[in-house]
Amino acid sequence: MVNVDVGGGDRMALAVLAQYRMARTEQVHLLLTPDVRIEQTRRRLAKLRSEGLLDRVTLPQAGRTRVWFPTRHGARIAAEWPELRAQRIPATVSDRTAVRLKVEHGLAVTEVGLAFVRDARHRGEVCRPLDWIPEVYHSLGSGEAVIPDALLYYRTGDAGDIEGGSMLRAFVEVDRATMGPERLAAKIGAYARLHRYVPTPVGRQRRFMGEQAEESWRRRYPLFPRLLFVLDGTGPAGIEHRIGALRAAAADTGPYGFLREVHVLAAAMADILRDGPSAPMWRPVQNPDHRVGWNQRWRP
């Protein structure tokens, strides 16, 4: 790499684009350097492109929006960094055609992540750009898996108080109404299966050694992450219909106690972008007449 500001803004820009998959120029700017002029971000992205680390596609809409993504070379370099080493960066992240075909959903996921990062800054809490991790793979065995649109890490309380506050995690699904309500709602059942999934031990020796089998998610998280559905691509009536489908699907998980342990919430993306995700706009799927903050503790 030539003239790359290692450890600084160039490195972070490449890391964010490798992890987020894609972002508009303005999104990169607001994630990384909102206090400087956007021209500096444009120059940085252009420099990384000239060095073969980033590429871009230009959308045909008015304004000819530029969407940035890592090249294969840039993704390989970023994947070796400690902060990204545990992430799976798919090969298609660098494919121009794949980026173009996934751009609407991909940019929506990035926009929701940006909303959480900006909200944390405003509240003096902690959610840094790399605390939003798209497409984290969670096995269900037999080749099946749960892959949320993003995994969110967030710490409440004063950012300067390292002992105060609490650590929150959430699986986030961004729905743009490209699938029917029933298919969207079926995702609740998949997460309920992940909540109770215990991998089959390899061989008989482990059983004889008296090891206690446990759910696979406990190896990653002290508590099962909250489940947030962000709804877009439809009007108020469509959102109500989709929340109704989520409520029906949630009722089917009752025998397993999933909803007693996991907060499952839904909110309109327009409300999140207008008021910030910490506002009390989230609707518990088992009681959608209520409004709560996603980061609040409440009883179902």
Image (tube, grey):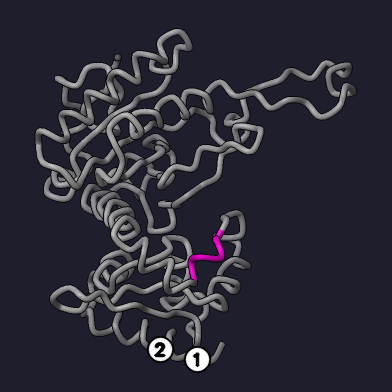
Residue 186 vs residue 29: left or right?
A: right
Checking the image for residue 47, the label placed there is: 2
Mark 2, secondary structure of its residue: helix
At label 2, which amino acid type do we have?
Answer: Lys
- Can you say whether 130 is above or below 300 in the image? below
Characterize the magenta stretch by its predominant secondary structure.
helix
- Can you say whether 140 is above or below 42 in the image? above
Q: Mark 2: few, some, or many residues within 10 Å (few <14, many ≥20)?
A: some
Q: Nearer the viewer, residue 193 or 126?
A: 193
Checking the image for residue 91, the label placed there is: none
* Residue drawn at x 39%, y 28% as measured from the top left: 186
As for residue 102 lying within the magenta part, the answer is no
The quarter of the rendered structure image containing the N terminus is: bottom right
Quadrant location of residue 99? bottom left
Question: Residue most toward the front?
Answer: 180
Residue segment shown in magenta: 89-94
As for residue 92 lying within the magenta part, the answer is yes
Q: Nearer the viewer, residue 80 or 289?
A: 289
Residue 45 % position (x, y): 36, 82
Residue 293 vs residue 1: left or right?
A: left
* Residue drawn at x 49%, y 42% as measured from the top left: 147
Residue topped by disc 1? 3
Residue 244 % position (x, y): 22, 23
